[in-house]
Image: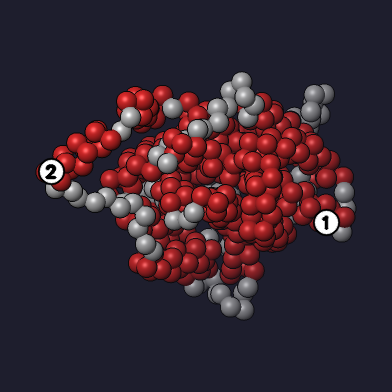
């Protein structure tokens, strides 16, 4: 799309400009996520979720109709700013089911996000430029011929419209009951008489903790770890498609958009199977922290092997690439789901929306920087093919591994605090 908008003067600069389009969505979400989280705590999860889905229908459609680079950036920014969906959905997932099913519920949220990151590029690979790929169905003079990237966006918007309609039957999980003033005073007097003095001190300390999310170190440390791994995942997602489609002379794989789309579709299917059937059992045995540490440790050698795939030929290349992509993305979702669990267990229900909104703000900032940074680094790496130290794309994957290693180190006890389960009741 960036190529056809004619903003990049050279092929090597496409990654640079594509990164800013990806960053626009996250930058918009960074500015508003905390506000949407607070709104979800005040008016309920359902209205915020429905408005977020509605914004997808409108602005995703407009993105597909973009005729200039700046229109593409503007529509992505507005989509991010008006879409406060993910934070309230994480709170909703915790609240809608029993404690023993929390890992499965949050894994479904992260799976949905992960599958979206996979299916989205796959849809783009199959449905972009339909007049060129399917001339018997779409003529060059048709709407889809004049707007070659509208079809995948339209499909996403139609799906979002169906989801919006289904949200009508979604039950609200935030219930605030109005109590009369006299009744409230009598209840408080009775509780004050019955509660043991030690329990009063504990409740007072608990209320002090609830006053400020920033003083809740179990929450803040898990958010920081979440942001680091989110930065890595977004940078990896940006780099993967650019690297796979770039020419072998630059260290890429010279794959077509259809080939990349097929790889991502297979990965998306594996995420669904893994999160539904394997992750809840892994979390039950290892817990969210240990499973995240193992996953991060396994990601490093896999990423180290990526740039050497350029020396493989078909059919071995497709087999190895699919296996590596499936393993890498499932490990990444394991880490993100673990941090979801830690965040939501660190706060009570009345702060869950705000806490998740705060996490979304931090994550969105890092994910806004990640595509732009990855695009710039990728363009720079392709120009240093003859360098002595990690030439070409080897440098890109080396830097991704540095970020992964940093995230792994932050999951240990010297930094990451485990929330007290009693605080989240």
Q: Which residue is mark 2?
A: 181
State yes or no: discs 2 and 1 in contact (Cβ < 8 Å): no
- Find residue 181 and report its horizontal and vertical position in percent: 12, 43
Indicate whether 38 appears above or below 214: below
Q: Quadrant of residue 201?
A: top left
The kind of secondary structure element at disc 1 is: helix
Label disc, if present, on residue 297 of the rendered structure: none
* Direction from residue 192 to residue 305 in the image, left or right: right
Total marks in image? 2
Q: Position of residue 425 (x, y in %)?
A: 42, 41
Q: Is residue 209 left or right of residue 280?
A: left
- Residue 202 is drawn in which quadrant? top left
Q: Is residue 90 visible?
A: yes
Q: If you read the primary sequence from the N terminus, does the residue marked by circle 2 or circle 1 appear first?
A: 2
Name of the residue lying farthest toward the top = 414
Numbered badge on residue 319: 1
Q: Residue furthest bottom?
A: 136
Q: What residue is at 80 percent from the left and 24 percent from the top?
A: 389
- Alpha carbons under labels 2 and 1: distance apart: 68 Å
Does the image show residue 146?
no
Label 1 environment density (alpha carbons within 10 Å; few <14, some 14–19, many ≥20): few
In the picture provided, is 105 more to the left or to the right than 210? Answer: right
Q: Position of residue 197 (x, y in %)?
A: 32, 25
Residue 252 placed where, x, y %? Answer: 76, 44
């Amino acid at each position: 799309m960036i190529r056809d908008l004619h903003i990049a003067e050279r092929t090597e600069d496409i990654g640079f400009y594509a990164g800013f389009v990806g960053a626009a969505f996250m930058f918009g979400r960074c500015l508003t996520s905390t506000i949407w989280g607070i709104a979800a705590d005040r008016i309920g999860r359902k209205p915020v979720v429905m408005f977020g889905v509605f914004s997808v229908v409108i602005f995703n459609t407009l993105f597909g109709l973009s005729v200039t680079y700046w229109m593409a950036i503007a529509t992505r920014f507005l989509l991010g700013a008006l879409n406060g969906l993910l934070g309230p959905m994480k709170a909703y997932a915790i609240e809608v089911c029993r404690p023993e099913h929390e890992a499965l519920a949050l894994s479904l949220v992260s799976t949905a996000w992960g599958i979206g990151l996979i299916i989205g590029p796959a849809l783009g690979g199959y449905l972009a430029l339909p007049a060129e790929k399917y001339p018997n169905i779409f003529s060059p003079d048709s709407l889809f011929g004049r707007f070659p990237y509208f079809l995948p966006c339209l499909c996403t918007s139609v799906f979002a419209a169906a989801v919006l309609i289904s949200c009508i039957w979604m039950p609200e999980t935030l219930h605030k009951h109005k109590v009369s003033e006299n009744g409230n005073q009598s209840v408080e007097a009775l509780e004050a008489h019955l509660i043991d003095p030690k329990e009063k001190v504990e409740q007072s300390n608990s209320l002090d903790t609830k006053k400020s999310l920033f003083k809740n170190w179990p929450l803040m440390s898990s958010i920081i770890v979440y942001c680091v791994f989110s930065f890595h995942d977004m940078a990896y997602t940006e780099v993967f498609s650019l690297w796979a489609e770039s020419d072998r002379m630059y260290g890429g794989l010279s794959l077509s958009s259809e080939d990349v789309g097929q790889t991502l579709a297979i990965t998306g299917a594996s995420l669904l199977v893994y999160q539904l059937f394997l992750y809840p059992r892994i979390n039950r045995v290892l817990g969210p922290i240990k499973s995240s540490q193992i996953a991060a440790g396994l990601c490093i050698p896999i990423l180290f092997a990526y740039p050497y795939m350029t020396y493989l030929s078909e059919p071995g290349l497709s087999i190895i690439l699919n296996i590596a992509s499936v393993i890498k993305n499932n490990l990444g979702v394991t880490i993100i789901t673990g941090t979801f669990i830690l965040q939501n267990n660190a706060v009570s229900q009345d702060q869950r929306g705000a806490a998740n909104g705060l996490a979304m703000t931090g994550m969105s900032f890092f994910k806004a920087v990640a595509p732009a940074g990855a695009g710039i680094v990728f363009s720079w790496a392709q120009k240093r093919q003859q360098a002595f130290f990690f030439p070409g794309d080897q440098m890109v994957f080396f830097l991704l591994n540095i970020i992964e290693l940093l995230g792994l180190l932050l999951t240990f006890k010297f930094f990451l605090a485990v929330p007290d389960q009693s605080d989240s009741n």
